[in-house]
Amino acid sequence: MLGVFRRIYLTPVPNRRFLAVLHYDGGGFVGWQRQPAGRTVQAELEAVLERLAGRRTPAVGAGRTDSGVHALGQGAGFALPERWSAEPEGLRRALNALLPRDIWAERVHVMRTGFHPRRSATARRYRYVIGSDDAARSPFRRRYEWALGRAPDLDRLHDAAGLLVGEHDFRGLCAAGAVTPHHRCRVALAEWAPRADGTGVTFTIEGDRFLHRMVRFCVGTMVDIALARRPPEDLSRLLTASDNRAASPPAPPHGLYLVAVRYPPDLYAGA
């Protein structure tokens, strides 16, 4: 007797694109991107998305923060079944109920077709925090700022930061060997400011793209200039250098924060 075979067609569940804006303490991670070994933000988020969707669900970050680097506005994009789009706040609560304590979803947006968390970004903003007082070495602060322990010359920092604004080739101020189509970045904002409590300074930089460790190399070099360890004109030379051999060591990762990623308004559903 011949068996009867029936072909069963499964109707695919329609998906929508979402953007989650994440905060995380980078001290417990080897970075955003999934690695062969070590805990990553991407892997933690994808584990939660798999529980919510019932299947493996990739997440793509707007920026690949390094080990120890924090975030106050990392963009993470992913696709989930259409039903979640009816209540993005409910999705945010579900994420936060399952995410570990060192990751928090601040907002969740439903995005339009064509959105990509990395390629669609028009600007990214970073902040670097330096502590100049002795208390910066407290275990409750040193995990989140560079405990420099002395006050850098703010005028020298201002002058150096001004040189970064505009479009430059940053191969002299980034990690060697990075795989990238080019090294040109357009910096729209680069400024230093005293911290409100008088305990140090902060650096804010915004640009269309950033190279691997570029912000940390810039900060390390500017601080050396502000401490009179190297002449101010060195920064101009580094902006035309063909490699990073003359750069100062990069600033420590734990003082760096990814604070915002900007997207065109028309990519948000309902805009």
Image: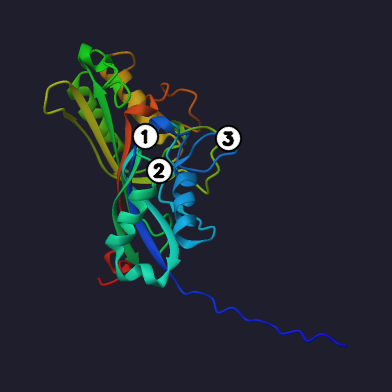
Q: Residues within 10 Å of mark 3 (few under 14, many from 20)?
A: few
Marks 2,1: beta carbons within 8 A? yes
Q: Identity of the amino acid at label 1?
A: Val
Image position of 123 with respect to 264: above or below: above
In the picture, measured across the screen, residue 122 lies left or right of residue 195, that is right
Q: Nearer the viewer, residue 199 or 242?
A: 199
Marks 3,1: beta carbons within 8 A? no
The residue depicted at 22 percent of the width and 30 percent of the height is 202
Q: Nearer the viewer, residue 118 or 269?
A: 269
Q: Residues within 10 Å of mark 2 (few under 14, many from 20)?
A: many
Q: Find disc 1 in the rendering and name its residue.
A: 215
Local secondary structure at mark 3: loop
Q: Identity of the amino acid at label 2?
A: Phe
Of pointers 2 and 1, the one earlier in the residue sequence: 2
Image position of 186 with respect to 177: above or below: below
Gap in Å between the C-alphas at discs 3 and 1? 25 Å
Q: Find disc 3 in the rendering and name its residue.
A: 37
As drawn, the residue found furthest toward the right would be 1
Q: Residues within 10 Å of mark 1 (few under 14, many from 20)?
A: many
Q: Find disc 2 in the rendering and name its residue.
A: 210
Local secondary structure at mark 2: loop
User: Residue 42's mark?
Assistant: none
Q: Quadrant of the N terminus?
A: bottom right
